[in-house]
Image (tube, coloured by chain):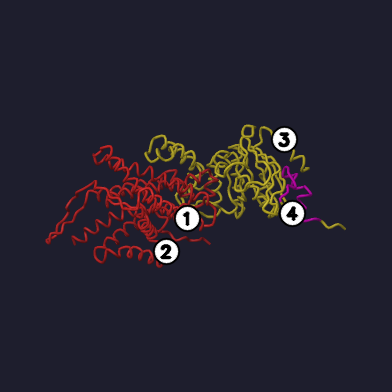
Amino acid sequence: MSVTAAAMAEPDHTSLLKVTHLTMRFGGLVAIDDVSFVARQREITGIIGPNGAGKTTLFNCITGFYKPTVGRLELFRDGKVAYLLEQMEGYAIGQKARVARTFQNIRLFAGMSVLENLMVAQHNKLMLASGYTIFGVLGLPAYRKAERAAQEKAVHWLERVGLIDFADMSAGNLPYGAQRRLEIARAMCTDPTLLCLDEPAAGLNPRESAELNQLLLSIRDEYGIGVLLIEHDMSVVMGISDHIIVLDYGKKISDGTPAEVRNDPAVIRAYLGEEEEE
Amino acid sequence: MEYFTQQLINGLTLGSIYGLIAIGYTMVYGIIGMINFAHGDVYMIGAFQAMIAFLICGVLGLTWVPLQLALMLIVAVIFTSAYGWTVERIAYRPLRGSPRLAPLISAIGMSIVLSNYVQLAQGPRPKPIPPVIRGGFQIMESEAGFVVQLGYLQIVIMLLTVVLMAIFAYLIAKTPLGRAQRACEQDMKMASLLGVNVDRTISLTFVMGAGLAAVAGMMVTLYYGVNDFFMGFVAGIKAFTAAVLGGIGSLPGAMLGGILIGIIEAMWSAYFSTEYKDVAAFGILVLVLIFRPTGLLGRPEVEKV
């Protein structure tokens, strides 16, 4: 699969995120060097590459932590460009463009209960319903209804990820694997159109990671959202990705289906090193 | 015994006022991890707003006391909240993400600006107003003829404090705004990724703190009947002491600390010396910082390894 052909792939009605000529420099260090790709709805797009390839930096650009040095990040809705992520404030990317993400090192609100973590994720809806808190304090019916709906949704996700029995426990006291699942549930509570997962299987045992695969596949199929997945665990990436992008030293070196990427000589070189010429 | 009871009542009243100011310190510290040194002066602004509202009542010929009080409360809270919002906007937001020392210095600058601005606008002399609420219950009388009085005003102050505390406890624990504040407290970046507007949440925290400080300012205006441009300094530092004593970052802690400081101050004045009452309050600050830096109700930060 040639790199250029994939980069040229025109966006169509299933496109969700189109990244064009994205470059991120930190002083003299080029963390991402002219990367272009398209991620689609109802697809899991895996992003792999050796350590330091720029995978997390790519996520940081998409979710507004960094402002890219060069490049465009177009988010599509109904086949049209709806948002230019590189120009948006951090909170607006979550609130309006509805891009959600999880982190390599877990970032839950450790001091809040499991349920509250999911309620914070629905903050904007509730804030509107509560008339910026005024009606909330008065306890008006419209607000109570919204609060109940939010709670039902939180409970739904707790059941999905198997944490319903821990709803009132403080999130910091959950076991590691449960914290990972809670992060995904929290991201889903924001009603995302694009879900960015940064190494969700890190530190999970094989059984947990198989459950994670099932969860991600069902999220893709039921909610029709796009998933960007950074992962080192090849059984996860190769098993569930519809489409894989390989980065190395900030450059995209391959782009295609799992089978294509697996046999791409450029990828093999990046992971295993070059064979010495006789 | 009668003398002690009277001092306890006075201490509780004073403590309620300190507690309300202390909540402003503790909430701001909770969310941005920084002491808002301009908060004492925001309280002073609140006291002046209440006084101006009272004088306007006089000009308009409104003499019905509940109406006067309501008007003072509304005017003081609205205008002082606006000051609180402005302080955050000018002195803190541009410095977000800079080293901790920078906003600290700009907060001290803001405090000097506010007190000098009031000195210029209102003059340096203390401004008196006549008492609005007089009288009270006589709850006991000793054989020597010492009468223990519980003033109506003291009842108003304590009741209002309890009501406000209840509202705030509910606000923080149950409403989306309170949840957003607690989320920002723990991880601002993450909260913003989930769509919480962090800047607005911080602004609202300052506004809420300023609103409570305004109530405290109004009550002091009624209680002592004298305001001057420098009143925010000592009251602010004492409320800060209260917040530290209770455990900074903890809402019930701020209230508890405020009441304790109020009682300690009243008792010290009654049994030892009025001149040295500030020494008692600040002595407590020193002792707390040495022996229990997390305060009475504060949680020590435990790192999980």
What distance separates the C-alpha of mark 1 from that of mark 4? 44 Å
What distance separates the C-alpha of mark 4 from that of mark 2? 52 Å
What distance separates the C-alpha of mark 2 from that of mark 1? 15 Å
N-terminal of the two: label 4 or label 3?
3
Residue type at mark 3 is Glu
- As drawn, is B192 to the left or to the right of B206? right
Asked whether residue A241 appears in the rendered view, the answer is yes
Residue type at mark 4 is Tyr
Q: Pointer 2: what residue?
A: B293
Chain assignment, label 3:
A
User: Which disc, if any, is residue A271?
Assistant: 4
Residue type at mark 2 is Pro
Instruction: Indicate the chain coloured yellow by its letter.
Output: A
Q: Position of residue A196 (x, y in %)?
A: 61, 45
Chain assignment, label 4:
A
Q: Secondary structure at mark 2?
A: loop
Instruction: Indicate the chain coloured red by its letter.
Output: B
User: Which disc, if any, is residue A10?
Assistant: 3
Determine whether label 1 and label 4 are within 8 Å by CB: no
Do marks 3 and 2 both belong to one polypeptide chain?
no
- As drawn, is A168 to the left or to the right of B10? right
Q: Position of residue B216 (x, y in %)?
A: 33, 50
User: Which disc, if any, is residue B33?
Assistant: 1
